[in-house]
Image (tube, helix red, strand yellow):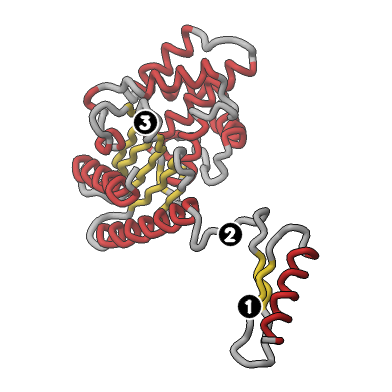
Amino acid sequence: MRRSRNLIIAVAAAVILGGGGLIVLGMGDDDGGGLLPTSLSGGEKAKPAGPSPEELARIERAKRAKQLDAALKLVAAETPDFSVALIDKKTGQTYAYQGTTKFDTASIVKAQILACELLKAQDADREPTEGEMALATPMIQLSDNNATTELFEHLGGKSAITKCNKRLGLSQTTVNKAWGLTKTTATDQVKLLSKLVDTRGPLDADSRKTAFSLMNTVDDTQDWGVPAVANPGETTTVKNGWDTRSADGGLWAVNTIGRVTSTDGSVNVSLAVLSHNNQSMDSGIELVEKVAKLTREHLKY
């Protein structure tokens, strides 16, 4: 009884001295009593157990990326060389498979030339001239090579586009005076695509609108590649590139770059797939579309 009374007195004293927060003293199993104070103060909140929703989302994205890696390795075992990169603006996820491997651009460089032409007009505090748009429009919509060559030279050729690349953050792209032989990476290409829509990037609102309107209205015969992954009701932009040279033994380089978005903002993805050593243009298109679709299947955007 004396021991119980002493314990009650000790608890009461602890309540008084604890400043209002109840301090419960738990007695040990033995008479020596390892007394373990546990605070139940109303001013403290218990920390949630386990990972946060953000951490769980990161874990899930990493899991999906590994699954995509495995799927692409199976494709790579049977097909020509390819690379793919993606930026999901909604989730912040980036993904790359062979993302820093260099490929010939072929005609996807035309999106880069367009961005440089728009920047040149901005620098002069003017809209693109009618003559410039008369070249830029068929360059993108029809992939017109003659218009591209004329605009490339108008901008200052290799040196001017190289300088422009620095403003666009394209550190892995090497411009060739034969513009179609420019070397680039999938990682650089999704960076370019992001700059074409970045409200804090080098392109102003009018330039971004021009780039979108051209890349959203390519000729039906060139509406392949990235658009193949879009669901009904989603919006796409695209620039494709294809080329065959005797130096490559007649094999084909086939590339596609573009964006997929939805009006509710749930989809906001930049995607680039580059490839070479394809037996034909058609087989190259089949490859890049297959790879593009795998990114959506596994990354769930």
Question: Under tag 1, what secondary structure?
Answer: strand
Which percent across, then down, holds residue 30?
62, 92
Foreground residue among 247 and 4: 4
Identify residue for label 1.
26
Residue type for callout 2: Ala
The tally of labels here is 3
Q: Split into 4 quadrants, where in the image is the C terminus?
A: top left
Which percent across, then down, holds residue 128?
52, 12
Q: In this view, does 254 lie to the left or right of 125?
A: left
Quadrant for residue 260, please give it: top left
Question: Under tag 3, what secondary structure?
Answer: strand
Task: Please report the residue visible at 49 percent of the width from the left and 62 percent of the height from the top.
Answer: 50
Identify residue for label 3.
261
Q: Split into 4 quadrants, where in the image is the N terminus?
A: bottom right
Residue type for callout 1: Gly
User: Can you tell which of label 2 and label 1 is closer to the viewer?
Assistant: 1
Question: Under tag 2, what secondary structure?
Answer: loop
Single out the residue that lies furthest toward the top.
Answer: 130
Bin the neighbour count of mark 2 within 10 Å (Cα to Cα): few under 14, some 14-19, many 20 and up. Answer: few
Give the mark, 2 or 3, whose residue is nearer the N terminus: 2
Q: In this view, does 248 lie to the left or right of 206?
A: left
Q: Which disc, if any, is residue 46?
A: 2
Tag 1–tag 3 contact (CB < 8 Å): no
Task: Please report the residue visible at 62 percent of the width from the left and 86 percent of the height from the top.
Answer: 28
User: How far is mark 2 from mark 3, CA to CA?
Assistant: 41 Å
Foreground residue among 6 and 291: 6
